[in-house]
Amino acid sequence: QVQLIESGGGLVQAGDSVRLSCAASGLTLSNFEMQWFRQVPGKEREFVAGIFWSDGSISYADFVKGRFTVSKDNVKMTVLLQMNSLKPEDTAVYFCRAVHRITTRAYWGQGTQVTVSS
């Protein structure tokens, strides 16, 4: 059974940092790209960052470059999203997604709320 469990969200102030974690199980991670998305009410989920487990290739949405860093822990089978210099517009539910690099079958976590106050 595939499970993606996010943690690390919360209420912070503008300029603060937060680190999100996504613990994965039930997957052969070397076949997947692990991604972070975010969503605010009334809007579609938007891509934030991704990392291919096999070779560590990374991509970011333009709006987070230089502020967010995605990484992986091969031992803990966890994907991390370090978010620095947070802005109120970063307030969203952040979701972890695993997408198979060949079949594109995808799995989602339940999401974790990040709220940035001004």
Image: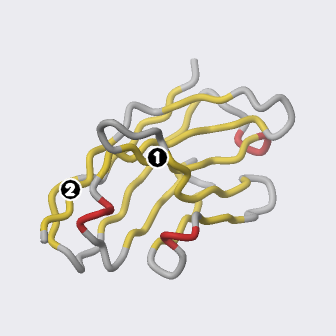
Q: Is residue 85 above or below residue 77?
A: below
Q: Amino acid at mark 2?
A: Thr
- Side of 101 relative to 113 (left or right): right
Q: Is residue 29 left or right of residue 37?
A: right
Foreground tag (1 vs 2): 2
Q: Can you say which quadrant of the picture contains the C terminus?
A: bottom left
- Using the image, determine if residue 5 lies above or below residue 85: above
Could you classify mark 2 by the number of other residues whose Cα lies within 10 Å: few (under 14), some (14-19), or many (20 or more)? many
- Residue extending furthest front? 42
**On the image, numbered disc 2 is attached to which residue?**
115
State the image coordinates of residue 26 (x, y, percent, origin top left).
Answer: 61, 27
x and y, in percent, of residue 31 in the image:
79, 40
Q: Is residue 34 above or below residue 55?
A: above
**Does residue 51 lie above or below 77 as drawn?**
below
Provide the residue designation for mark 1.
Answer: 22
Q: Residues within 10 Å of mark 1 (few under 14, many from 20)?
A: many
Please report contact status of discs 1 and 2: CB closer than 8 Å, yes or no. Answer: no
Residue under the image location 62 percent in, 38 percent down: 98
Give the total of numbered labels. 2
Looking at the rendered structure, the kind of residue marked 1 is Cys
Q: Earlier in the sequence, mark 1 or mark 2?
A: 1
